[in-house]
Amino acid sequence: MDVVTGSFGYIGKYITRVLLAQGRAVRTITTHPDKPNPFGAAVQAFPYSFEQPHRLTEALAGAETLYNTYWIRFAYDGQTFDSAVENTRTLLECAREAGVQRIVHISVTQASPASDLPYYRGKGWQEVLVKESGMPFSIIRPTLVFGQEDILVNNIAWLLRTFPVFPIFGSGEYRVQPVFVGDLAQIAVASAQAPPGSTLDAVGPEVFTFQAMLRLIAETLGRRPLLVKTPPALGIFAGKVLGLFLRDVLLTADELKGLMAELLISDQAPNAPTRFSDWLAENRSTVGSRYSSEIARHFRWSAR
């Protein structure tokens, strides 16, 4: 039996699918255990009981591997990157107490506790905690993850479908290297059988400049927006204004800085086969057909 954090979400859902296909029993720890369960009786859901560690330990009891996807994209509603790091510490302490035999931790490329960007710095501290946990581990560092439930690529496509003008922040020549979420899940599950103590990037086969990726998405969707080079600060301001109407956070300044610093590419040879361009062509009818709200997905959801 394995435990996956966030089986009802994005990356965790794909990891869960791979494990179930291999005949593994799966439990999940999730922010919203009362959400509709896409796996039915096959996956039992438990809450993130960070304030009641004994309950978290009980949820982890009997697990062979913990696949950890827990993190936050931005600070919101009292949650901060620092609190997420402390929650990770609690989760790992409970896993050790419960006798978990292996940790597979999903991080991000170029995470570092010395980073100037809180997202990447917090991810770096998560990695430190995993390494110091005393349990065998694998750390998987994906680049820009894409898939059906993705928010960033989907919302770029939605904006390109909706508006006649789209901003290119700065030069637009900074690079991204997309990796398919299904490939990431396969790499993560395979790493549970690899020698412990490894850190591995999950890397797709294509590299684009941000400008080229925008043009590819627009052309694939049959759109011809005007792409306008914009100072990053102005673009973030415009995004905040649009976010007020959407009741969401489109893009943070730190996310843009990480993108422009090329933190979402890898020097490692590609190990994920799915090409972003092929996937985009196959899913052109659905990508960006509706807006995906990060806040609605993770903070506002209610069973009532």
Image (cartoon, rainbow, N blue to C red):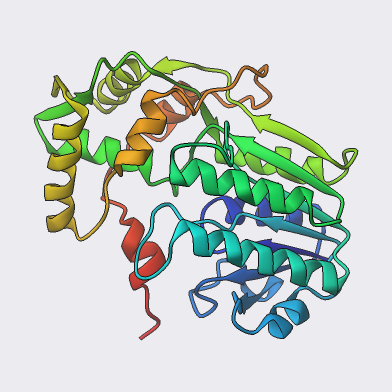
Q: Split into 4 quadrants, where in the image is the N terminus? A: bottom right
Q: Using residue 37 as the reference point, say whether residue 131 is left or right of it.
A: right
Position of residue 297 measured from the top left corner of the image (x, y, whole percent): 38, 63
Residue drawn at x 38%, y 46% as measured from the top left? 151
Please identify the quarter of the rendering in which residue 51 is found.
bottom right
Residue drawn at x 86%, y 56% as measured from the top left? 134
Q: Using residue 165 as the reference point, say whether residue 16 is left or right of it.
A: right
When the figure is inspected, residue 25 is found, relative to residue 200, above or below; the finding is: below
Residue drawn at x 35%, y 63% as measured from the top left? 76
Please identify the quarter of the rendering in which residue 135 is found.
bottom right
Q: Using residue 16 as the reference point, say whether residue 258 is left or right of it.
A: left
Position of residue 186 measured from the top left corner of the image (x, y, whole percent): 71, 40
Q: Using residue 199 as the reference point, say whether residue 118 is left or right of it.
A: left
Q: Going by the picture, which residue comes out furthest to the left?
A: 164
Residue 7 visible here = no
When the figure is inspected, residue 43 is found, relative to residue 129, above or below; the finding is: below
Residue 244 visible here = yes
Most foreground residue, 115 or 93: 115
Residue drawn at x 57%, y 50% as measured from the top left? 11
Q: Split into 4 quadrants, where in the image is the C terminus? A: bottom left
Please identify the quarter of the rendering in which residue 95 is found.
bottom right
Position of residue 58 measured from the top left corner of the image (x, y, whole percent): 77, 81
When the figure is inspected, residue 134 is found, relative to residue 98, above or below; the finding is: above
Position of residue 32 measured from the top left corner of the image (x, y, whole percent): 50, 74
